[in-house]
Amino acid sequence: MHILIASKSVIPAIKYGGIERVIWYLGKELIRLGHRVTYLVNTGSRCPFTEIIIFDPNKTLASQIPDGIDFVHISYFENDPLEEVNVPYISSVQVNFYDDRKLDVNTVFVSRNHANRFGSDVFVYNGMEWEDYGTVQLDNQRSYFHFLADAAWSVKNVRGAIKTIKKTTHDSLHVLGGKRLNFNKGFRLTLSTRAKFHGMVGGGHKHSLIQGSKGLVFPVIWHEPFGIAITESLYYGCPVFGTPYGSLSELIPEDVGFLSASSSELALAIENVEDYSRKRCYEYARDQFSSAVMTKNYLAFYERVLNGEQLNQNQPTLVNTSEDRKLPWS
């Protein structure tokens, strides 16, 4: 099958870029399974393992689908008339919306919670090609906890992560994805000596920092659609200490982490981090959130569409349009 993966992203991801990594690994796995893959992506993209076409923002997606394509995997194109696409397709959505827009009937979300909030039950968990993540060291000495997200984004709640760590006896936090002084998306100056900021990091440097961590502190205050930071951290043997919002309740069973909207309760759990098995965290992420599992699940939805099925009975739309954009935290 010749599959076109269409995204307004630039591939590959250099440091951060969850969508970029997802479609990169999806394409590699589809090729490994014997399919032909072409990417339709933004200028600046490159790919050593298959063909790319540069997306023209002045044209519709439908007009840029080349001849001979059997299926299109669309990474959400906002305001693009998908009804003009005359090839079987799905539209995968990785983000939150807070308005009453109607999504395509063949929309696929990235977690059960994400789908349910839009009146759907159609989802595929994101998966990484773990071979790219190097050797996992589960018996090494670890001396701090980490936060992994764009710290300038208030819903990721780096302030809450630092507040939580300061309630522990002596633990420290390494912030991967932010600076101590931030003017982006609002002023923030963090004075605590128990927080170390590494800025935006990626690749091997990011991986080595996670491998030195006892656990991920992830107190998001929105409904996280998925959270690649969660699965990456688990893969390196880090239990997750977060809030019970969005995908977290389904991604983090009690044997690999602890969830609470209370910084005091999270701090207490962090003090007992040795109760969690690094090996269990690693094996759980390896087995459940690989690119092979993700691709298999997407292929099942491709097959349903190719057989003439509509994935969602109605166009998905946000069930509760008055949903709080920032959720309770103390």
Image: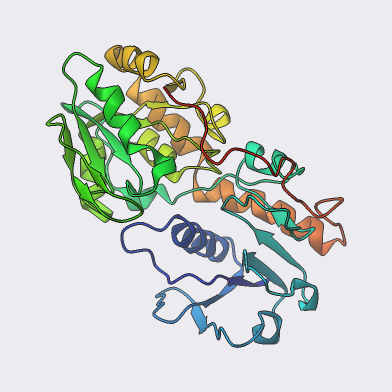
Q: With respect to residue 320, does 294 lie above or below?
A: below
Quarter of the N terminus within the rendering? bottom right
User: Quarter-wise, where is residue 105 in the image?
Assistant: bottom right
Q: How is the image coloured?
A: rainbow
Quarter of the C terminus within the rendering? top left
Q: Is residue 202 visible?
A: yes
Residue farthest along the left direction in this orientation:
193
Residue farthest along the front direction in this orientation:
187
**At x 63% / y 47%, what residue is drawn?**
124
Q: Count every numbered label the image shows and give the total.
A: 0
Viewer-nearest residue: 232 or 313: 313
Q: With respect to residue 17, does 140 lie above or below?
A: above
Viewer-nearest residue: 324 or 292: 324
Horizontal placement of 50 versus 114: left or right?
A: left
Q: Where residue 43 appears, x then y in whole percent? A: 44, 82
User: Quarter-wise, where is residue 266 in the image?
Assistant: top left
Horizontal placement of 179 versus 234: left or right?
A: left
Q: With respect to residue 280, does 198 lie above or below?
A: below
**At x 55% / y 38%, what residue is drawn?**
223
Q: Where residue 131 appears, x then y in whole percent? A: 37, 50
